[in-house]
Image (tube, rainbow, N blue to C red):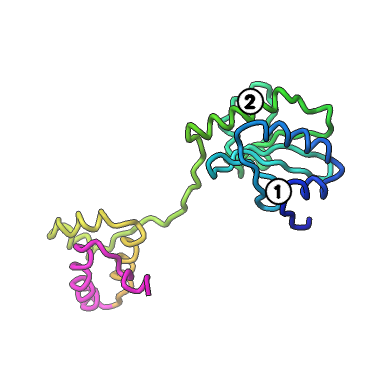
Amino acid sequence: MKKVYSVEEYIEVNNHFANELSVLRDIIISTELEETVKWSAPVYALNGKNVVGLGAFKNHFGIWFFNGVFLKDEKNLLVNAQEGKTKALRQMRFESMNDIDQAAVLAYVKEAIENQKLGKEVKAERKGKSVTIPSELKTLFKNQPDVHDSFKALTPGKQREYCEHIESAKREATKQSRLEKIIPMILQGVGLHDKYKNC
């Protein structure tokens, strides 16, 4: 599909559902949502947060609810596009104009707006690696609790940098030398590579 820059272009490109998309668009823009185009499709946002979007395909068209998982769905109108993969997104699918219950669509959109105002959203899971603390650092923390407290205050990324720095040393002497060098840095709350990050 060619890149589109306006909702009008999107409807024109999907002219087999032009009237239907226009009806859905009119319902959505009757609310306080702001109309934008993202990923070459109409998206409607509230204070910069995506709430709903319009989509058209070969045999169906519909509305995407970005955090549709929180909708009550009393009329059982929503589907999960990719069961097992999609956590928050839900679709309301239609195949013809006759499928559109305008009152229901408006009610669902309004509920989605309220949910957004309440801050209901599925946060993306960060698949960060857990921090494995080498035995040399554990010993240091037992002997110097202030260093341990400072270490715990660091971000997981900075903690990981220090752990890997100690772990990667082959010789015990190198590990001890590295430990001595990082103690003041940990106490200052800086990361191992901070001095290079803003170069």
Q: Position of residue 196 (x, y in %)?
A: 35, 74
Say the numbered circle drawn on residue 151. Answer: none
Question: Which circle, 1 or 2, is nearer the viewer?
Answer: 1
Residue that badge 1 annotates: 41
Residue 9, relative to residue 79: is it above or below?
Answer: below
**Cα–Cα span, label 1 and label 2:** 24 Å
Which residue is drawn at the image coordinates 54% and 29% (left, top)?
114
Q: Secondary structure at mark 1?
A: strand
Q: Position of residue 124 (x, y in %)?
A: 50, 47
Magenta segment boundaries in residue numbering: 171-199
Q: Secondary structure at mark 2?
A: loop
Q: Position of residue 189 (x, y in %)?
A: 24, 61
- Residue 173 vs residue 121, the one in the foreground: 121
Side of 25 relative to 158 (left or right): right
Quarter of the image with the N terminus in it:
bottom right
Which residue is drawn at the image coordinates 73% and 46% (left, top)?
7
Residue that badge 2 annotates: 73
Which residue is drawn at the image coordinates 61% and 28% (left, top)?
110
